[in-house]
Image (tube, rainbow, N blue to C red):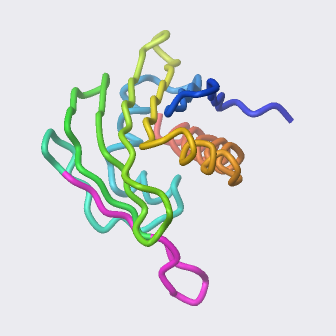
């Protein structure tokens, strides 16, 4: 099965460019990234804090079935333009990955469709390549599929 979320990783670059077309209005796609209840559903994580604004911050936590914390994620929002753009840092605590910089752009394609473009910049090409060795592509595609499914019910 072809993955709807496309990941472009050019040789010798520290970045990934991720694109996905959604059968959602851009306002609803953007809302999926800023509303804690929606984020928790499609990411499958607990949203401890989500300040969707410039200079805001966020903190997520994912636990296993026994309630043990598996991963904690956090970051700071540097740019926030509703329905257009979010620039933020992303850090997974207690992992070999350093802080990364994420540029999210939300584009209106039509009244009922939109496109998400994410540019993720890593500290080194080696760290970016290490991320690509994980089931990152499949996981992100599954999360985006859930996002679309959840938000389709909100139309």
Q: Is residue 154 left or right of residue 83?
A: right
Whether residue 22 is visible to the viewer of this picture, yes or no, is: no
Of residue 41 and residue 121, the one placed in the foreground of this image is 121
Q: Is residue 136 above or below residue 114?
A: below
Q: Is residue 47 above or below residue 57?
A: below
Residue at 49%, 11% (x, y): give it.
Answer: 109
Residue 97 in the image: state x and y as whole percent: 47, 57
Residue at 71%, 52% (x, y): give it.
Answer: 135
| Start-end of magenta stretch | 57-71
**What is the chief secondary structure element of the magenta stretch?**
strand
Residue at 52%, 76% (x, y): give it.
Answer: 70
Quadrant location of the N terminus in the rendered image = top right
Whether residue 16 is visible to the viewer of this picture, yes or no, is: yes
Residue 142 in the image: state x and y as whole percent: 67, 47
Q: Is residue 51 left or right of residue 142?
A: left
Q: Which residue in the rendered view is the most extreme toward the right?
A: 1
Residue at 42%, 52% (x, y): give it.
Answer: 38
């Amino acid at each position: 099965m072809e993955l709807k979320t496309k990941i472009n990783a050019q040789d010798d670059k520290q970045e990934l460019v991720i694109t996905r077309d959604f059968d959602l209005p851009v306002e609803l796609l953007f809302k999926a990234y800023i509303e804690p209840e929606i984020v928790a559903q499609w990411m499958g994580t607990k949203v401890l804090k989500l300040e969707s604004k410039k200079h805001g911050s966020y903190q997520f936590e994912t636990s296993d079935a026994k309630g043990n914390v598996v991963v904690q994620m956090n970051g700071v929002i540097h740019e926030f333009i509703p329905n257009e753009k979010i620039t933020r840092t992303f850090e997974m605590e207690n992992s070999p990955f350093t802080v990364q910089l994420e540029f999210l752009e939300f584009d209106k394609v039509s009244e009922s469709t939109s496109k998400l473009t994410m540019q993720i910049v890593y500290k080194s090409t080696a760290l970016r390549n290490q991320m690509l060795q994980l089931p990152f592509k499949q996981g992100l595609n599954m999360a985006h599929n859930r996002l679309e499914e959840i938000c389709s019910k909100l139309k």
